Image: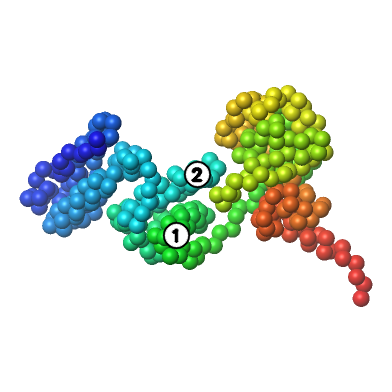
Amino acid sequence: MKSYSQMKVYPINWETSKKSISKDWIVRYIFTDKNGAEYSTSFKGMNHIKDHADRVNETKRLILEEQFILEKGYNPKTKEYDNDSGLDLVNPSTLFLTACNACIAGKDCVDTTRTDMENSMKHITKYATKLRLHTKKLKDITKGDVKQILIYMKKDKHSNYRINKTKSHLSACFTFFTELDIFQINFVRGISKLPHESAKKEIIRTDDDWNKFHSIQHMNYNAYMFLYIFLYSGSRFEEMIKIKKEDVELEKSIFWIHLLKGGKHTRAMRPINLNTFKFWKAIYERAQPGQYLFSYNQMPSDEPVKVKSIYDLCTKYLKAAGLNITGYGLKYSYLNLVAKIYGITKAKELAGHTSERTTKIYAVDHEEHLVEQNKNIDICI
């Protein structure tokens, strides 16, 4: 059973001695979690006030606020809200941060998306607490409240990219709240994005760099086969690690991936590029029915590998080969070549994008290629 002891303020003469204003005040108490474990807990938040009477009043207010959130299930050790019922039910009276955490916990998404949203929640929690929004019921949250969170992030010099990401994740939460009829509209969508220019993505362009990439086969042939297949796949790491033997049709030179976008599961077909067929065939023939093709040591196994290990693998061998790119830089390098030779529409199709606008972000030399083509338009007037 969760509980907390009496909250004591130090120095002990904080209420009566005006001289105590020269010292830092702190509130201490013992928190007992639902498993019976006790934790010494403390908080401040009043020491910026230099008037004694005002500091006393603020301290009393902070104590009441702390007691309020503790009664609502706040765990000061984990910095999260516990739900003893085991159900993450969200209703108009649910506290704002509790509702956001419940939305993210129940969201159907890939692990990397969930991790990204959880990172945003750290910022949301920090600034919502500064603004006293953590004690506010969900139904009372306004568009202005959300905007204030983003303004505070800007004041603390967070990048426009991070602020826009946080806004996007808040918008996803409020879409969920709207579906629950807690709000009539998702007002977060009405908050303008901040201007942001993405850093140009590093890709492979020269023959020398492609030779460096091919040198990986002498370091770890299994890793090289996977990276080569991934280069042409038009897929994400999260999708590649879930491919089973039954998802591959060698006779048709196709494979199937399981997409999860916008909360929807779909099965999508991808081509096996003729340059990668021998690698697909080699791995396919080693796999037993039901096995994941790209698992431990990039070989078939009964259990899927963690996506983080794939990121780490790519970083390790690309760096060892002398290439300053990420694993996804391989994918962008291929899309860039396809866009140059076959056009942006074909690159969009291979990447599985829904719009050419998205593909142009990754086909980084597309505009330059267009300018080069336009130089050779031969119309003599």
Q: Which residue is mark 1?
A: 178
Real-space CA distance between mark 2 and mark 1, rounded to the nearest whole angstrom? 20 Å
> Which residue is depicted at the point 60% across and 46% down?
265
Percent across and percent down for residue 128 are 35, 54
Q: Amino acid at mark 2?
A: Arg
Between disc 2 and disc 1, whose residue precedes? 2
The answer to whether 236 appears left or right of 11 in the picture is right
Q: Mark 1: which secondary structure? A: helix
Between 119 and 45, the residue placed more toward the observer is 119
Between 175 and 127, the residue placed more toward the observer is 175
> Which residue is depicted at the point 77% across and 53% down?
346
Percent across and percent down for residue 206 are 77, 43
Between 356 and 354, the residue placed more toward the observer is 354
Percent across and percent down for residue 357 are 67, 59
Q: Which residue is mark 2?
A: 114
* Mark 2 closeness class: few <14, some 14–19, many ≥20 residues within 10 Å: some
> Which residue is depicted at the point 59% across and 27% down?
303
> Which residue is depicted at the point 24% across and 41% down?
42
Q: Mark 2: which secondary structure? A: helix
Q: Amino acid at mark 1?
A: Thr
Tag 2 and tag 1, C-beta contact below 8 Å: no
Residue 379 in which image quadrant: bottom right
Compared to 136, does 291 lie above or below?
above
Can the viewer see residue 209 in this picture?
Answer: no
